[in-house]
Structures are given as structure tokens and as C-alpha cells.
Image (cartoon, helix red, strand yellow):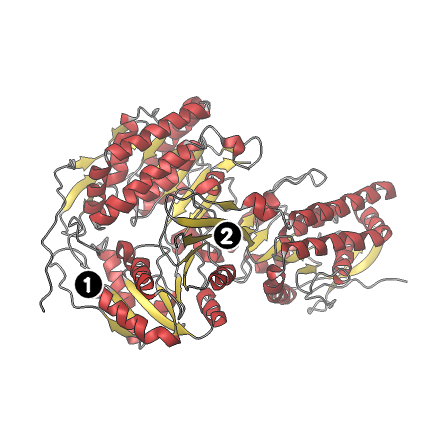
Amino acid sequence: MSRFEYAPAPESRAIVDIKSSYGLFVNGQFVDATDGKPFKTVSPASEEVLAEVSEAGPADVDKAVRAARKAFDKVWGPMSGKDRAKYLFRIARLIQERARELAVLESLDNGKPIRESRDVDIPLVAAHFFYYAGWADKLEYAGVGDDPRPWGVAGQVIPWNFPMLMLAWKIAPALAAGNTVVLKPAETTPLTALAFAEICQQADLPPGVVNIVTGAGRTGQALVEHPDVDKVAFTGSTEVGRAIAKSVAGTHKAVTLELGGKAANIVFEDAPIDQTIEGIVNGIFFNQGHVCCAGSRLLVQESVYDEVLARLKRRMGTLRVGDPLDKNTDIGAINSSAQLAKIRELSQIGEDEGAERWSPECELPAEGYWFPPTVFTGVSQAHRIAREEIFGPVLSVLTFRTPAEAVEKANNTPFGLSAGIWTEKGSRILWMANQLRAGVVWANTFNRFDPTSPFGGYKESGYGREGGRHGLEAYLAH
Amino acid sequence: MRKTYKLYIGGAFPRSESGRSYVVNNAKGKFLANASQASRKDARDAVVAARKAFGGWHARTAYNRGQVLYRIAEVMEGRHQQFSAEVAAGEGLSISKARAVVDASIDRWVWYAGWADKLAQVVGSSNPVAGPYFDFSLPEATGVVAVLAPQDSSLLGLTSVIAPAIVSGNTVVAVSSYERPLPAVTLGEVMATSDVPGGVVNILTGSASEIGPWLASHQDVNAIDLCGIESEDEARDLEIAAAGNLKRVRRPAAEDWTADQGLSRLTQYLELKTVWHPIGV
């Protein structure tokens, strides 16, 4: 019997108006950069140039920090929490109003499926602003003492995997606590941050409260090392996190880091099989695997290994890879050629080290950056694909016999961001959750996020939490 | 009878592996004792002991950890006179002031003892997510904590940096005040006789400047308190070394050890674990 084919169901780009070039957003206005070269941001699905973006050099970063300082001293710091709350609520509403546009823009610039940007990213962005808006006039109830104070100017550097969501995770609690911010989006995904700058203008946010400086590592470094930045917040690789931890050493700066992961997704023999297969797929193929908490190490109990693998492969065969703007797409484009090269390199190393590689038959588009959903079997703990973060749609499968062995293998990593447990036995879930050294444990689910729910890692996955009361605490001196 | 002061590692009292000792004088410069001068190897042995003890200590119930901390206070009470004499000699205090310091130290153990079974309720949370999930967050110990104890406050300061780390289930390697190490050695003897499992607290007498870099760069230490480092440059270098495995760092800051400590020393050495589960029938 032949399979029914899907007809294309593309989302229209007409709703998005991308300018040919963008300046920096400093002190409430778009301004030209003075000491950096402009760069281009492309659609990873087609390699089409979307816009030219300014690179902020140290002098530009300095202007942005000065604007933030002035806004902190004169406007935002002295403002009542009640009034700050109203601005944040207004921003949340504007995001809802422009949700469709933002989702399309995010998928164009990042390569993620519209289904995810529309149903996950942007709704969560609005939810974060709503959640933290409500904290702005309740800081003394946050459980951090009776005199919580903002740090001052927050310098924030975010990654390309969830550009708008990471912006919300950073900006919403910072502003609610009374800080002003200078945020640097990733160089490959600056467009939604620049759209957010327009939203700040529409919300009449006082100039300087939010500043957006675009650029790459050099810009981020200038921001993090700026002497007048009081609080540094970074999400990204462990390697860069380490460099930031070193650069803030000996300073007065507060710092939070959300870094890499190599999560174990642990499947017991009594797991509900259909939900588990969906959970495994969601765990590693959500957002092309560009997720720091992705379930990239699948630990399967030996007794159900054959069945789980067979069903997983069958399910992977139904995943649709292609145009991010098609509403039927499950896996979009890899964000950049550099990231694609890294995924290819580590996958090749996996083969060279003796693991067996499998992908379903799938035709990849000729243009753009693509990698098929991939599973490696015969993986041992020493393999680099079981130890290093690949940050792509690549799953390594290991096995175990006893819960104790599962715990030992799961914890055998310098990372400690997240973990998954699949079993019908409640007492085992709670025992496992106790034993796992990870900041987020999903039981019979995976990759769930919510503004009220603290997120962050143990060990080399970084320090501090985002989300919830604890995420607010990171922006308050006490 | 003159006493021999030794290190406290893994529940035992070894001399320094290096064979070194150093002269400890009282505040007026008069000889008090020879103390063991801990080396890099001693520090590494202590980390091994602390790691080994972590699983068991962390797994104990909060109620039990609270009891053990309270027991420390009880046993200290019995050695009140010895602590007072050592604090008086080392810190140059009158005996009555030294007694007050010992009282405050005992009170501090009692205060922290009571936190053991309250932390999770104050710091943890149930998270009302927008979906059919049960979602809660719990504090957990971060692991092995290295402590470079205050140089000035040899007992109250030491207590104030060790107690908040261990009450939540961390294990500790502490380097005592260099010039005033005797109360630290005696505190180790208290640990050994007060139900604290071997390895939960390890006390090294010696130089924080010498041992600090090995602890700061140690890959199996999860957090470090730089309290006892007085030079800003040294503290910065240690913080840079600590970045190697992204240790949680407590930077040195002026502290009044007699004041109420608040929660920050407790929360400094905690991780927050968030657990999700679907709701349904």
C-alpha cells in the first residue's frame, strides 16, 4: 500500500517586513554602529540573505552600557514596582498581538519549524513577560529578605537555538527586579531581538531600559567585561561559560551561567511504550536537537532494547525534514554551516570509534544546512558521541540492566542539566529523581518549559536558575 | 601534658604526609604548639575522603543531619574550657570574651542544626505550570565544598563557614586560620566524637595561600569559599582556577561573624532540582 503524501502547507512570509539593514538599539533608538563591520544574517533553510546587521564594537557597547546606567539611575531604578509591572504587561500583550509575525521571523532566521516557533517559542515568550510582570511590585515577597535590590546594569548574552525565548528568559526577570539591560543576541539569529526593540518602542519603554547590541563573540566579550556592568547572564556553551567565569573573577559582578548538557533519557522495561517513543523523539529531535537539555543519551533497559529500537526507527522514518515554514515540518534546518560542520564531524567520529549509525531515508533540500535525524547504536560510555554535546539531531543509545546501573551511567558526565525517566512505577520515578545529579528531571515527559518552573544545571552545566521565583532571585542583591 | 596537633582527614588524625609542621604562637608571640602543615597531597586526600562521604551524608534524612549538627554543639559544650583557652591565646582575647566567642559558636551550630529540615520548605517550591503537570523544585547539596576559613575568627568564623555547608548534605574540606589553627584541630576532635561520619568534615591546618590553588583547581570539588584569602589578587587567581570546572565560588567579603548570618551561606551551596510529571488518569 502506498503512503499518503502530505501536500505542502507553507506559512506565508507576507506578515513579516524585514528591513535590508538594521542598526543597534541604544537608548531607545536604532543607531549606526561606529566601530564594527556590518554582517549578514541568512536563512539557514535557503542560505538567502535576510538582512544586514550592525556589529557593535567596544565603543558601541560602551554607549549602550552608559544608556542602561543612566536609565537605571534616573528612571527605571526609582520607578515604583507597580509602574514597572505595567510596562512588562504591555510588552507581553504586544508580543501576543505580533505572535504570528514573530514566529515566522524566528523560523526564517533560525531554521526551526514554524510548528515549534508558533506553538512553543512565542507563546512561552509572552508567558515569561506575563509571569515576571507580576513580580515587579512584589519583590519583598520573593523570599530573599525584606530589602531586595536590583544589581543595576545587566549584560546578557544569549544563544541562537531559542533566540526570542532566551531573550525573554533574560530580559523579563531583569526588568521586573528593576535592572536595566544590554542584551547581545547570537550573530546568526538577531532579527527577533531587533523586532523586540520595536516592541519596546511601541510599549513606550523609557529609553535605555533595554538596549540590544548585535555582533559575535567580540561584542559579547566587550559587554561581559565592561566595568560598569553589574550582573552578567549567559546562556551558551560550557567553553564560553568557562571563559566568562574567568573574566568576571575578582570583580564585583554577579553572574549566572546556563551551559551545555548531555542528558540521559532513561527507559525502563515497564515504560508506556508509545508515549516513551514520542518522548525520545521530542527529547532529541525537538528544535533539530539544538537544545542544551536535549535527551541525547538514550539509556534503554536491556530487556526492551530491541522493541524500543525498532519502534524508534519506525517513528523516525515518519519525521518530515524540510522547509521550516511548512506547517507539517518536524525537523527544520541546522542553524549555520559552522554548526552543521560540527555535527558532521562528531558523527564521523562516532562511526570511526565503532558505533553504528542509522538514519531513515530522507531527501534533504539542495540549498541550506541540513542533517537527517540520526541514531547511533553500540555506543559505550567512553565514546565521544556519548560524552560531548553535539547540539544536533543525533541520538546515542546505551543500555543498562538495573536502576543503579542507569543512575551510574546517567551521572557519569561533567554535565548536570537535565534527565528523563520513563517507567510506570511511581516509587522508581521518585528514587531515580533523587539519585540523578541534574537540575531538571522530566518523568514520563521531556523538554517541558514554563515560566514558573526553575531551570538550570548542576556541575559544569552552569550556575543559577532561570524561571520561577529562583530566576527572579538571580537579578536581586540581597 | 603538651598536646600534638594533627590534621583531620576522613575521620582519622594523620600528620601531614609532607612531614612538615609549623610553630603556632599566641597573640603575644609566645610559643603555643607545633601544628601540622598540610600539603597538596593532604588536600587531595581530604577531597577523596569528602567525595567518599558525600553519598551517604547527602542521603541521610534532614532530620538526622539536624540531630548530628546539634550533637556537635553538645560535644563542644563539654570542651568549652579548652576552646576558650585556645581562642583566648590565639585571638588575644580575655578569657571571658573568649568564652563568649565559644558560646556564640555553639549557638551557631544549634541555629544551623535547626535549618536541616526546614530548608526544603523555605527554598523549594511547587510550580504552577500552565499545563497538566505536577512540577516541584527541591534544594540539594552541590557536593564537595572547599572552605578557606577566616584568618581572624578562628572558631566562630570557622563554624560559620562549615555549618551552613554541611547541614544541607555537602561535605567539606576546610583549611583553618594559619596563625590560629588550634581551635580548628579541637573542632576536628569534636567532629570525631559527635556522630559526624568520617570524611564529612576534613580540617587541614596550614596555609590557605599554599593549599588554596590545589583546591580551587581540583576537578572533584564543586564549590569553594575564598573567605580566608586576604589578598585581592590571590582571590582573583583562585576564582580563575575555580572556573576550570565551573565551581560555585563564594568571594571574600567583609563579614561580621557575630551577626546573624541569614540564608546566603546556606543557599550558596545548594542546587535546585526541578521534577516534572504528567497529571492524568
Q: Which residue is mark 2?
A: B240
Closer to us: A268 or B206: A268
The residue drawn where x is 29% and y is 46% is A120
Residue B62 lies, in percent from the top left, at 63, 54
Return the chain for callout 1.
Answer: A
Task: Judge whether A73 appears above or below A212 on screen.
Answer: above
Q: Amino acid at mark 2?
A: Ile
The residue drawn where x is 36% and y is 65% is A297
Task: Judge whether A55 appears above or below B159 on screen.
Answer: above
Q: Are marks 2 and 1 on the same chain?
A: no
Element marked by disc 2 = helix
Return the chain for callout 2.
Answer: B
Task: Judge whether A400 appears above or below A35 on screen.
Answer: below
Q: Quadrant of residue A420?
A: bottom left
Q: Where the N terminus of chain B falls, by quadrant?
A: bottom right
The residue drawn where x is 15% and y is 35% is A17
Dot 1: few (<14), some (14–19), or many (≥20) neighbours within 10 Å? few
Q: Which residue is mark 1?
A: A318
Q: Where the C terminus of chain B falls, by quadrant?
A: bottom left
Element marked by disc 1 = loop
Q: Is residue A452 left or right of residue A36?
A: right
Q: Amino acid at mark 1?
A: Thr
Q: Is residue B132 left or right of residue B17?
A: left
Residue A230 lies, in percent from the top left, at 46, 36
Q: Is residue B132 visible?
A: yes
Closer to us: B244 or B145: B145
Residue B263 lies, in percent from the top left, at 61, 42
Closer to us: A233 or A124: A124
Dot 2: few (<14), some (14–19), or many (≥20) neighbours within 10 Å? many
